[in-house]
Image: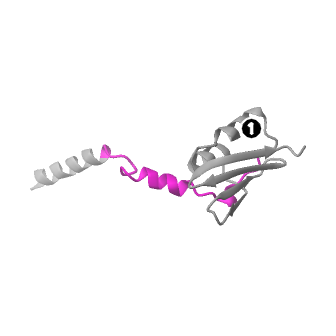
Amino acid sequence: MHRSLLALVLLLTTVAAGTPSVPTGWSSAVQVLEAQPDTRKAKPLGWPNAQDIAKLKSLEGKTKWKVIQVLGHPSAVRRRPDGTEVWDYPWCAACRVWIKNGVCTGTFYTGGY
């Protein structure tokens, strides 16, 4: 009896050690949850340099998750009737990103001049 129980515990331990922390098929669900903008997490970005502007432009066609990964969370989010989300970032002057159907459709930055 004890040997059977011990064998079962060892089997379960071995199987559990090889499983990923997020079950297969759930990774996309986890990314969707993480892809929701949270304006409370926005951080001032100051004056962007050429690399920042290049990163901003590179986001066109990328997912919400990637936008948040690169720029962080926006300081404001507005939703238009057509389903487009307009995200504003706390860069000096104006920085805006448009998201439709979970994908970045456009970006904009002006230094105020």
Q: Label 1: how many residues lie within 10 Å, few (<14), some (14-19) or many (20+)?
A: some
In the drawing, does residue 65 fall left or right of residue 29?
right
The extreme front residue here reads: 82
Residue 53 falls in image quadrant: top right
Residue 60 in the image: above or below residue 4: above
Q: Quadrant of the N terminus?
A: bottom left
Amino acid at pointer 1: Ile
Q: Farthest bottom residue? A: 81
Question: At 64% from the left edge and 42% from the top edge, which residue is drawn?
Answer: 59
Q: Is residue 79 above or below residue 108?
A: below
- The stretch of residues the image draws in magenta is 17-45
The residue nearer to you, when weighing 70 against 64, is: 64
Residue at disc 1, secondary structure: helix
Q: Nearer the viewer, residue 55 or 100?
A: 100
Q: Position of residue 92 (x, y in %)?
A: 83, 47
Q: Label 1: which residue?
A: 53
Does the magenta portion include 32? yes
Q: Residue furthest right?
A: 113
Q: Residue at x 47, y 54 (%)?
A: 30
